[in-house]
Image (cartoon, rainbow, N blue to C red):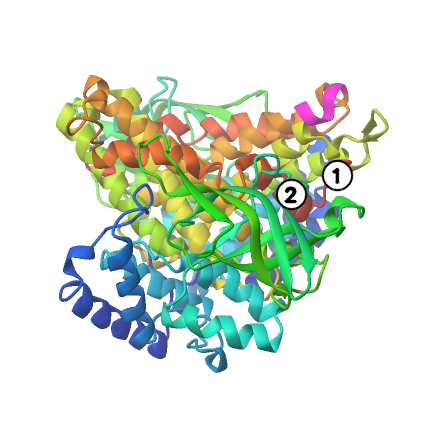
């Protein structure tokens, strides 16, 4: 494993920064925040059709570019940095990853080209209102008959669940427990018996939804992966998504640092820039230490993801815990360093603070991931 | 998680490993793990003999240019050697001040005569150096040094006091920051002078540390003499020379250090399992946090070592602050996991356990070689471009 970004990856980052400075300016983010859909369709078309970001990690035989998961890392950082409002994370990091890991050729042929082209959005619905992040949290059930599978239950905290065209839904057989008996199903967003409701959230830059399933019937070929073994697939998908989310957090945390440093250089009190005071300077130094270390954590996990290594679970949990803590810390310090203006609606600091809290919890909070890391260590 | 090595670098690793193993499983077996942090005042003579053996075989100062007695190793190769050294349980290196601080300073700022006189005995392990920087009134504010040097005929006469000088009692030479112009602004009246330690006019008083050992000392100068030509980088230019020395730290020791940290972390995990603390959810969180922190430290180091270019990158800037905090937290965690047993010594009068030793020593990690507060100033000013504090 090499421990630096390649020249191409650096170039990808620069190109993304140039694009997002305009396409995801503060004004554009605020506009997207106001909508129920939660993102701007024209920007989505641009980044998928013109820039081919949605095609990046999809294999070439399915209309993608077949690039590595580490290639995605700089993009995720930049999306985090600009708080891009977009179904990219749900579609690529959750939906497409589930398909690529668990789908057969027919599934891939059917869905991946559309995803690569930006025509199909997708997401993974695994969590429910019970607040559990493990297999026990899957209470939605399915049964099988000659026509296919029938799904019953309710999903919650589904990223972009109200708009995704394709839902990957985790359900279990009646009376099964733990990881046993869980399967993943591919369900169209407009399936009969399915009710989707936008859940307005404190962080307005990413949408969550609940999904009610009242005897939703899908065909036999809607089963993703092996029946009853869906939890392992779900976990693997979640780990990949956690790694991408960690990279996103690094970019956003670095933006908080940059904002704070910039302000500390120009804001004067007692006749000098506040950044010359150690009280402020030392806060910024700690933020830099955390941001660079978080980048290391996410980088390592992204690089492992491309190699299909066994340590992925440990690396993903380590990265998600470390990067969540870092982003929250930096977003909070950014407000503190800005003083009163940092507490206003007008200033963007709160948007990062809210995204930090939302991503901290999403796909498992730091405590969950540290416990998971401890178990992987053999404790 | 390893550094990427090409064929030549891998061969270098094997060569280093074989030599170290031959020596440390052979004639120097009793020196394994001796004289490390917290016990650097022990096995001095044996470690000097070891240093000479290293020098004779060409393993001292490997990062120096070949024409100056080194091997011209890259930073990667240096890091690999350090890692192998620690893996072989090599003893604390008595020559490291000469190798990592004085040597590079002379290579950069020294005259050809100074290089010719002083570099070879560092490479051979025959001359040991100590650093005369801190004073009672000049810690983080190093430029406030008051030790005075006056040129009388062919000699500098030195009066004053240094403190926290590691290895002062067994060093042959000391590089001393002295005030040579008391009229000039404080940064501009300092000279960097090379001084023999074994002479009348120098008194060394060891300082007993909180762990009971005495690795550093107070050094008193009362008419100590240095040769007129042994000023490095020019008279009154010592501040620039001293600051330049800081930039030579390239992080070569980082992988070796992390190997030690990994061993300590494993000891801590073993304690948690033995005492049953491993089933406590709060301890599990703290242990996992330390484990994640250690992995991150490793990636930080590998990123730093693969960074190309001469500039000091961000990973290098944060290195000291990061590892010293991590290590201090691990020490606290170790003692917390032990509970009441943490108090029990190996024996009277004050025989600390290994874990107690590094727990206590970790409180120094965040102070020496630039305290955490100084590190944060450097990160803020050099890494982030924040304005300096008015001085």
User: Which residues are drawn in magenta?
Assistant: A336-340
Residue hosting label 1: A262
Q: Is residue A46 left or right of residue A271?
A: left
Magenta stretch encompasses residue A9: no
Q: Residue at x 68, y 54 (%)?
A: B150
Instruction: Please identify the quarter of the rendering in which residue A211 is found.
Output: top left
Place of residue A298 in the rendered image (x, y in percent of width and height, measured from the top left): 45, 46
Taking depth in this image into account, of B154 and A167 the one nearest to the observer is: B154
Taking depth in this image into account, of A39 and B284 the one nearest to the observer is: B284
Taking depth in this image into account, of B204 and A298 the one nearest to the observer is: B204
* Chief SS of the magenta region: helix
The relative height of residue A284 versus residue A51 in the rendered view (above or below) is: above
Give the crowd class for mark 2: few <14, some 14-19, many >=20 residues within 10 Å.
Answer: many
The relative height of residue A208 versus residue B126 in the rendered view (above or below) is: above
Place of residue B289 in the rendered image (x, y in percent of width and height, measured from the top left): 36, 33
Residue hosting label 2: B145
Secondary structure at badge 2 equals loop
Quadrant, the N terminus of chain B: bottom left
Secondary structure at badge 1 equals helix
Q: Residue at x 22, y 31 (%)?
A: B352
| Residue farthest along the right direction in this orientation | A271
Q: In this orientation, does residue A223 appear?
A: no
Subunit that carries the residue with mark 1: A
């Amino acid at each position: 494993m090499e421990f630096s970004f390649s020249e191409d990856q650096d170039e990808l980052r620069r190109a993304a920064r140039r694009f997002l400075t305009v396409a995801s300016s503060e004004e554009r983010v605020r506009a997207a925040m106001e909508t129920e859909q939660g993102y701007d369709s024209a920007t989505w078309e641009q980044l998928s059709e013109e820039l081919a970001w949605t095609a990046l990690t999809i294999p070439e035989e399915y209309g993608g570019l077949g690039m590595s998961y580490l290639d995605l890392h700089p993009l995720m950082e930049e999306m985090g940095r600009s708080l891009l409002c977009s179904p990219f994370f749900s579609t690529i990091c959750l939906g497409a990853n589930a398909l690529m890991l668990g789908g057969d050729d027919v599934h891939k042929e059917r869905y991946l080209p559309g995803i690569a082209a930006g025509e199909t959005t997708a997401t993974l619905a695994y969590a429910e209102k019970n607040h559990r992040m493990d297999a026990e949290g899957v209470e939605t059930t399915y049964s099988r008959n000659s026509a296919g599978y029938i799904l019953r239950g309710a999903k919650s905290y589904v990223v972009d669940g109200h708009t995704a065209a394709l839902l990957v839904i985790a359900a279990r057989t009646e009376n099964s427990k733990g990881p046993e008996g869980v399967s993943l199903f591919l369900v169209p967003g407009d399936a009969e018996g399915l009710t989707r409701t936008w859940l307005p959230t404190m962080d307005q830059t990413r949408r969550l939804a609940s999904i009610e399933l009242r005897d939703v019937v899908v065909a036999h070929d809607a089963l993703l992966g092996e029946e009853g073994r869906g939890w392992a697939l779900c976990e693997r998908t979640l780990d990949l998504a956690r790694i991408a989310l960690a990279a996103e957090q690094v970019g956003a945390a670095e933006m908080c640092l940059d904002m704070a440093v910039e302000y500390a250089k120009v804001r004067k009190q007692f006749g000098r820039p506040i950044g010359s005071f150690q009280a402020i300077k030392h806060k910024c130094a700690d933020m830099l230490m955390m941001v660079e270390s978080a980048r290391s954590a996410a980088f390592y996990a992204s690089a492992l993801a491309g190699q299909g290594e066994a340590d992925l679970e440990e690396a993903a949990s380590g990265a998600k815990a470390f990067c969540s803590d870092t982003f929250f810390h930096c977003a909070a310090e950014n407000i503190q360093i800005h003083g009163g203006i940092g507490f206003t609606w007008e200033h963007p600091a709160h948007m990062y603070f809210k995204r930090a809290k939302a991503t901290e919890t999403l796909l498992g909070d730091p405590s969950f991931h540290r416990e998971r890391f401890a178990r992987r260590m053999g404790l | 998680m390893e550094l990427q090595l090409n064929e030549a670098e891998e061969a270098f690793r094997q060569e280093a490993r074989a030599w170290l193993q031959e020596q440390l499983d052979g004639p120097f077996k009793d020196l394994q793990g001796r004289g490390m942090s917290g016990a650097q005042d022990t096995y001095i003579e044996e470690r000097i003999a070891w240093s000479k053996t290293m020098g004779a075989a060409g393993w001292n100062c490997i990062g120096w240019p070949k024409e100056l007695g080194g091997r011209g190793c890259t930073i990667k190769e240096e890091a690999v050697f350090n890692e192998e050294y620690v893996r072989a349980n090599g003893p604390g290196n008595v020559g490291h001040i000469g190798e990592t601080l004085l040597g590079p300073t002379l290579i950069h700022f020294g005259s050809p005569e100074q290089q010719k006189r002083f570099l070879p005995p560092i490479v051979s392990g025959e001359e040991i150096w100590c650093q005369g920087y801190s004073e009672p009134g000049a810690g983080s504010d190093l430029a406030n040094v008051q030790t005075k040097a006056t040129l009388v005929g062919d000699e500098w006469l030195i009066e004053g006091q240094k403190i926290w000088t590691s290895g002062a009692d067994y060093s042959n030479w000391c590089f001393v920051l002295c005030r040579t112009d008391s009229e000039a602004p404080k940064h501009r009246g300092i000279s960097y002078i090379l001084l023999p330690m074994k002479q009348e006019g120098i008194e060394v008083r060891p300082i007993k540390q909180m762990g009971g050992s005495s690795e550093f000392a107070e050094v008193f100068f009362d008419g100590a003499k240095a040769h007129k030509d042994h000023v490095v980088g020019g008279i009154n230019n010592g501040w620039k020379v001293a600051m330049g020395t800081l930039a030579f730290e390239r992080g070569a020791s980082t992988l070796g250090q992390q190997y030690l940290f990994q061993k300590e972390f494993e000891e801590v995990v073993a304690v948690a399992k033995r005492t049953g603390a491993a089933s406590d959810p709060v301890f599990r969180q703290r242990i996992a946090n330390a484990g994640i922190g250690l992995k991150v430290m490793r990636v930080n180091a590998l990123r730093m070592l693969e960074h190309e270019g001469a500039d000091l990158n961000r990973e290098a800037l944060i290195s000291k602050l990061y590892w010293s905090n991590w290590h201090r937290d691990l020490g606290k965690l170790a003692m917390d996991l032990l509970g009441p047993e943490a108090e029990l010594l190996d024996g009277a009068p004050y025989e600390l356990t290994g874990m107690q030793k590094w727990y206590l020593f970790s409180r120094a990690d965040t102070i020496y070689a630039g305290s955490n507060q100084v590190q944060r100033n450097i990160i803020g000013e050099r890494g982030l471009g924040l304005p300096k504090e008015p001085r």
